[in-house]
Image (cartoon, rainbow, N blue to C red):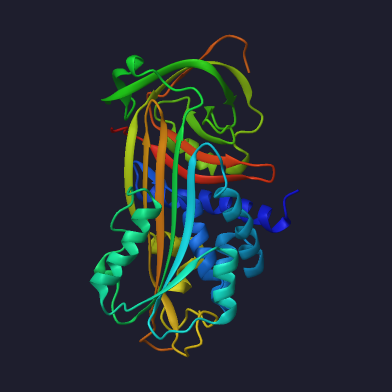
Amino acid sequence: MASKELLEVVTGNSRFANNFYNFIAAEEKGKNVFFSPISAHTVLAMAYQGAAGKTADSFASTLHVGNQEVASTGYHHVMKTLNSVEDVMLHIANKIYIMHGFPLKEKFHKSTSELFFSEAESVDFAENVESAKKINIWVEEKTNSKIKDLVTADCLNELTRLVLVNAIYFKGNWAHQFSKEATRTEKFYISDSETVDCDMMHITKRFNYRDDEELDAQILEMKYTNENVSMVIILPHKRNGIEELEKKLVNVDLSTISERMRNVEVEVSLPKFKIETTMDLNDVLTKMGLGIIFEPGNADFSEVSESPEPLHVSKVIQKAFIEVNEEGAEAAAATAVTMFRCLAMPIPVQKITFKVDHSFIIILQTHDEAASHVLFYGRIVQPKY
C-alpha cells in the first residue's frame, strides 16, 4: 500500500507538471516543448529541504507538497522505485556540489543523502571552467551522453555556494515494435493547411485506447517491454486543436490519464522524432509563485549551511532530450539549481485509426502498485528526425 507521503509527492508532481507546462507552452507558442517534470520537481524538493520561513511556504505551494518531511519521505520511495524498474533503462540521480569550506547543516545533509540518495562533492567554484566541466561530466555519465554542457562556466564564480543537480535517463523498446520497412515519408500538418514532410511509422496491433469527449481528443497508450512503462499520446480531433487541448489538460491529473482505457485493435501512424530542449526556468518558476528563491535579501535558505552567509538561487536550468523511432524511445533530462551568496541587502468494436498527422501531446510514465509517475511531458508541433 502506498504511503500518504508518496501519493502526495506523485499528485504534487502531476499538478506541478500541468502548471509548468501551461506557462512553458504559452511562452514557446508554435514550438516543440519537451521537459521532465519529475527532474525539476525532485531538484526543487531537495532545495526545499534547506528553506525556511516564507521561502519554505513558497516551495510547499508551488510543489504541492505539505512540508519538507513529506517531500523527502515521498521522494525516498520514488527514487527507490524508479531505479529498480526492470526491462528498460531508467536511472534517476541527484548530486550536490558545495563550495570548499562551506559546511552543510547536518539535517540538510542527512535528508538529501539518505532520502534523495544524493552524493555531495566539494569544489572550488572560483575555478569556474573546471567546476562546470566536473558537473557536466557527471550529468553526461548519468544520461548516457545525451545531455551535455548542462552548466556553463559563466553560471559559476567565487560567489557560488551550491549547485544541486538531478539527472534522469530512459531508454526502452516498444512491446510492439514498428517495422522499419513500413516507415515512409508523409505529410504532417503544422497548421490547418500548411504541411511538412515527416518519417511516418505504421503498425496495427491491440493498444489501450479511448476517445475522450471532454478533451475532444483520442488517447493512445503504447507500452514498452516492461508493461509498467508507457508513452501516452493525446491527439486532438482537430488539426488546429492543440491550444484548446492544452487548456483542458491543466485540470487533468496526468498520473491517471491512462485509466478507463479499452484494449482494442488500432491502426497507428506515428512520426519518428528527435527533440532536444534547453530551458532557463527562472521566469516560469517565478510565474508559478517561486520567485522569492531568486531574490537576494528575501530568499531564506538558512537551513542549508552552518555558514551565516545568506543564500539565494541564481539559476535553475533544464536540458531534455527524446528520440522516438521504430524500436522505442530514448529520453533524458537534467536540471540544475545554482545558489549564490547574497551580496545585496539582507469505445467502438471496429478497428480504430490513430493517425498522428498534426500537433499532439506525449507523456512518458511509469506505473507501480503504489502510483504512476510522470517522467517526461511534451508537445510535438513539428516532428524532426
Q: Quadrant of residue 286?
A: bottom left
Q: Residue at x 50, y 38 (%)?
A: 88
Query: Which residue occupies the foreground of this view, 95 or 208?
Result: 95
**Is residue 63 at all visible to an observer of this figure?**
yes
Left or right of 185 on screen, residue 27: right
**Is residue 58 at all visible to an observer of this figure?**
no
Q: Residue at x 53, y 67 (%)?
A: 46
Query: Which residue occupies the foreground of this view, 362 or 250?
Result: 362
In the current view of this chain or complex, which residue is farthest to the top?
350
Q: Residue at x 48, y 57 (%)?
A: 93
Q: Position of residue 89 (x, y in %)?
A: 47, 42
In the current view of this chain or complex, which residue is farthest to the right?
1
Q: Position of residue 127 (x, y in %)?
A: 25, 77
Looking at the image, residue 348 lies above or below residue 317: above
Query: Which residue occupies the foreground of this view, 35 or 29?
Result: 35
Left or right of 105 on screen, residue 36: left
Left or right of 76 on screen, residue 241: left
**Quadrant the C terminus occupies:** top left
Badge count:
0
Looking at the image, residue 349 lies above or below residue 277: above
Query: Which residue occupies the foreground of this view, 296 or 155?
Result: 155
Looking at the image, residue 111 lies above or below residue 179: below
Q: Position of residue 333 (x, y in %)?
A: 40, 51
Q: Position of residue 380 (x, y in %)?
A: 38, 36
